[in-house]
Amino acid sequence: MQKAVFLDRDGTINEDVGDFCSLEKLLFINGSIDALKILQQNGFLLIIITNQTGINKKIFSEEEFLNFNQQYLKILSSYGVDIKEVYYCPHLKEENCICRKPKPYFIKVATEKYNIDLKNSYTIGDHPHDVEMGQYCETKTIYLLTGHGQKHLSELKTEPNYIAKNLYEAALWITKNIK
C-alpha cells in the first residue's frame, strides 16, 4: 500500500485570489514547492483535491480550467514535483453533489486507484472542510493558517492533528512523525 498527502490547492499550495484560471494570477505560497518536494522525497503520493466553483459560476469554462491545470502541473514538474492526480469539483454547494468537499468521494476514488493506506496518509488544507474530509476517511489532518485558514480557524468543528502556519511547516511536521 502507498501513503499519500491529499492537498487543497488554492490557499494551500498557491495564493487564493478567488476564482481564477490564469497563470498571470498564479503565485505559489512561499515554501510550498519545497514542502511538496520534501513530502515526495519521503515517499508520499501527492494528490490535489479542490473545489472549483468558478466553472459552474461561469467565471471560466471547464476547458479553461483543464488547460490551466495542465500548465500548473508543468510548472510544478519543472521544480521536480510530481502531482499524481488533480481531482476537482465544479459544483456549487447548493447542488449537493457527491464530490464537493467535505464529502470524501475523491479520497475514495484515489484510494482505490492508487491502493492508498489512509491510516498513514494526510489531508492538508486551509478550510475546515479539508479537515472534515480527511477525518471522515481517517487520514491524519493538518489545518493551514495560509489562504482562508486564519479567517476560518474558529469554524473548525473538530481538532486537526496539527495546525501549521504554512505547507512547509506541515511537511516538516509530517517528516518528524513518520513511522
Image (tube, rainbow, N blue to C red):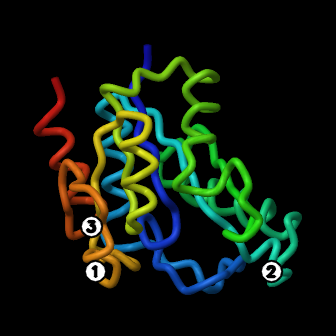
Who's the residue at 41% across and 21% down the image?
117
In this rendered view, identify the residue nearer to me: 156 or 50: 156
Instruction: Please state, as top left, top right, bottom left or bottom right, where the N terminus lies in the image.
Output: top left
Which residue bears the numbered disc 2? 57
The answer to whether marks 1 and 3 mark residues whose Cβ atoms lie closer than 8 Å is: no
Who's the residue at 25% across and 49% down the image?
171
Place residue 159 in its image quadrant: bottom left
Q: Dot 1: few (<14), some (14–19), or many (≥20) neighbours within 10 Å?
A: some
Query: Could you tell me if residue 49 is visible in this image?
Result: yes
Which residue bears the numbered disc 1? 150
Instruction: Please state, as top left, top right, bottom left or bottom right, where the C terminus lies in the image.
Output: top left
Cα separation between marks 1 and 3: 11 Å
- Tell me the amino acid under the disc marked 1: Gln
Determine the secondary structure under disc 1.
helix
Who's the residue at 82% across and 78% down the image?
60
Q: Position of residue 170 (x, y in %)?
A: 23, 54
Determine the secondary structure under disc 2.
loop
